[in-house]
Amino acid sequence: MTALTANLIEIFSAIQGEGLNVGTRQIFVRFGGCDLRCHYCDSQHTWQKQQTCEIEQTPGERDFVTHDNPIESSQLLSWIDRQNRPYLHDSISITGGEPLLHAAFLAQFLPQVKALTHLPIYLETGGHRPGQLVQILPYLDAIGMDIKLPSVSGETHWEQHREFLQVCRDADVDVFVKIIISQTTDPAELHQAAQLVADVSDRTIIFLQPMTALAQPHTNPHLSAPTPSQVLAWQALMKEYLPQVRVIPQTHKMIGQL
């Protein structure tokens, strides 16, 4: 089999700050390149493929070493093996950018990394590439997907989101949905998102994620956190459709796990 390569941004060990795995320790493998341009993105450096990537040498120490892209799967496996200290990590996070742009590489790499580490594989994705998801579904243990609200993200992918959730349901793979909310959130879009998810499976857990500033509050309403009353109202709105709607901010920003 010909060795495939991938463009990476970084590999590091940290505490997951979002969604169902919040608070758990993960090895993060961040891929370069994204086909979305969300208004709120705090990782714009991942939009384009990079000439180099940063590899942490010791889990959690941030002792990064720079390597040239692209990276072969054998090299990536060796870096992950070095990170994988006994009993430390709960799973491996495949993130980006948009990792499904690297589906061909992942289809070869994921069974190898699972055999090496015996850790669950968790995919973080924009939830808009169901065709690429199918290529790697057998190797995934859990998926965290976004639903992009047009009023907040500037992106519109309703039908792709629906198909993505249907693929996960039919494969019986655990999936949860994350929705970023800000002061510009249109409640009608929350109705639409809740109905979409409920139509596929009302057992799916929704995480409403209020915009979380790194420092001073933003003056741009797209990047400003919603008010407490807005969050409560929007959670109640979505719970008319789904029993599990949770509100969790980006906790990794609060504890310095960037």
Image (cartoon, rainbow, N blue to C red):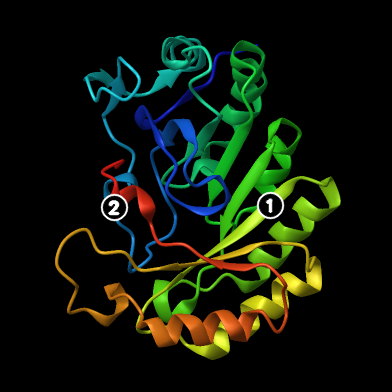
In the displayed structure image, the side of residue 56 where residue 153 appears, left or right: right
The picture places residue 150, in percent across and down from the top left corner, at 47, 78
- Residue for point 38% across, 65% down: 38
Q: Give the vertical position of 109 relative to 154 (above or below).
A: above
Displayed quadrant of residue 142: top right
Does any portion of residue 98 appear in the rendered image? yes
Q: Estimate the spatial distance between the alpha carbons at disc 2 and disc 1, rounded to whole Å.
A: 25 Å
In the displayed structure image, the side of residue 137 where residue 59 appears, left or right: left
In the displayed structure image, the side of residue 164 where residue 56 appears, left or right: left
Residue receiving disc 1: 175
At mark 2, the secondary structure is helix
At mark 1, the secondary structure is strand
Residue receiving disc 2: 254
Residue nearest the viewer, comparing 17 with 191: 17
Does any portion of residue 43 appear in the rendered image? no
2 vs 1, front mark: 2
Q: Residue furthest left?
A: 216
The picture places residue 28, in percent across and down from the top left corner, at 43, 32
- Residue for point 29% across, 52% down: 254
Mark 2 nearby-residue class (10 Å; few <14, some 14–19, many ≥20):
few
- Residue for point 63% across, 80% down: 238
Displayed quadrant of residue 46: top left
Q: Are marks 2 and 1 in contact (CB under 8 Å)?
A: no
Label whose residue precedes the other's in the sequence (2 or 1): 1
The picture places residue 234, in percent across and down from the top left corner, at 53, 83
In the displayed structure image, the side of residue 197 where residue 51 appears, left or right: left
Residue nearest the viewer, comparing 198 with 46: 198
The picture places residue 48, in percent across and down from the top left corner, at 32, 45
